Amino acid sequence: MWIIESILLAIAMAMDAFAVSITNGLSEPNMRKRKVLAIAITFGTFQGLMPLIGFLVGSVFEKWIAYFVPVIGFLILTFLGINMIRGALKCECEECKPIIGLKALLLQGIATSIDALAVGVAYTGGILHQVLITFLLIGVITFLLCSLAVIIGKKFGEKLSNKAELLGGTILIGIGLKFIVEFIISLF
């Protein structure tokens, strides 16, 4: 039964990365297959490794992780979203279309998976092989969903043209706001 729970957890954990992957596809509709793969690998790797890191540090940093993770996710995603919107408003010509670079991709990977640290902490004390399989499932399912998400984003990005980057930036800010609102609610 734990395997079904692990798959459902993996799907839930992948949703932020899925949304950001759609955004990446929207903002770069002519993206090459190699880059689609790089995005999916980045998100899958971060989503699989962050819970492992949380598991390894265990309850030592549990309060710190639970307190700062949403704030860090909010700041990174909001920063990326604002930059994306600013870029869309500055230049609407095809030559000015931004390319998702390595730095932005790594920041996205961190921001969307940082909450997985807390998931790893929650698994401290669990049966080791089940924990490791769960974390592997999180990474693999995130990889698969993000691959699909970028392709979906590319299709809509072709249709939306220059408005896609505005939409993408708004989505990133929305995900960031979701992090901070959940954090504020948890304080009460």
Image (cartoon, helix red, strand yellow):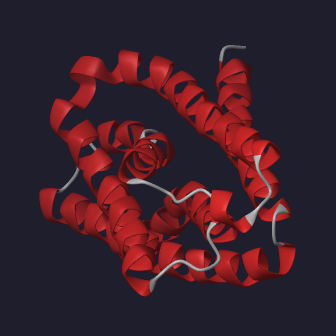
Viewer-proximal residue among 69 and 147? 147
User: Is residue 125 among the parts visible in the rendering?
Assistant: no
Work out which quarter of the rendered image holds the C terminus and state it.
top right
Residue at 71% in and 67% down? 94
- The x and y percentages for residue 181 are 74, 28
- The x and y percentages for residue 103 are 38, 45
User: Is residue 178 among the parts visible in the rendering?
Assistant: yes
How many numbered marks, from 0 up? Answer: 0
- Image quarter for residue 125? top left
- Image quarter for residue 34? bottom left
Above or below for 178 versus 168:
above
Residue at 49% in and 18% down? 67
Horizontal relation, residue 186 to residue 111: left or right: right
Above or below for 59 versus 13:
above
Horizontal relation, residue 87 to residue 163: left or right: left
Above or below for 97 versus 79:
below
- The x and y percentages for residue 19 are 65, 61
Residue at 42% in and 39% down? 114
Horizontal relation, residue 5 to residue 126: left or right: right
Work out which quarter of the rendered image holds the N terminus and state it.
bottom left
Above or below for 117 versus 187:
below
Viewer-proximal residue among 164 and 22? 164
Residue at 84% in and 81% down? 159
Viewer-proximal residue among 77 and 56? 77
- The x and y percentages for residue 86 are 74, 38
